[in-house]
Amino acid sequence: MGSVREWETQVLFMPRGTTRGDARRLLTEQAEYGHWELWRLRLYADGSRRAWLRRRVIRVARTA
């Protein structure tokens, strides 16, 4: 029986004008309280950011 990793994803959009500190604070809160990890971060030419977060889905085996 092999283990298949399943991930739950979330996309955060940070509008232009969001400071680097505010973006870091938002991502830190997501990591600490929601158990998310940063998967990908993209900074666009207009100054907006998009962050992809993921966390592992834990399946619990049923007991008899």
Image (cartoon, helix red, strand yellow):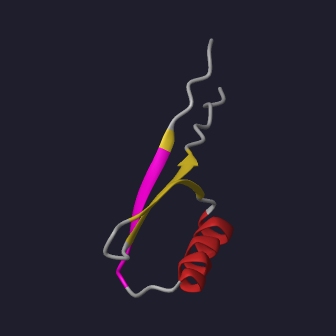
Q: Position of residue 53 (x, y in %)?
A: 50, 56
Q: Name the residue at 60% across, 41% down.
A: 58
Residues 26 and 63: in front is: 26
Q: Name the residue at 61% across, 81% down.
A: 25
**In this rendering, would 46 be left or right of 29?**
left
Residues 36 and 39: in front is: 39
Q: Name the residue at 36% across, 66% down.
A: 44
**Magenta-colored stretch includes residue 12:** yes
Q: Position of residue 20 (x, y in %)?
A: 55, 81
**Magenta-colored stretch includes residue 36:** no
Q: Position of residue 38 (x, y in %)?
A: 57, 57
Residues 63 and 8: in front is: 8
Q: Which residues are magenta?
A: 8-16
Question: Where 56 falls versus 49 (above or below)?
Answer: above
**Prevailing SS of the magenta stretch:** strand
Examine the image and state in which quarter residue 1 appears: top right
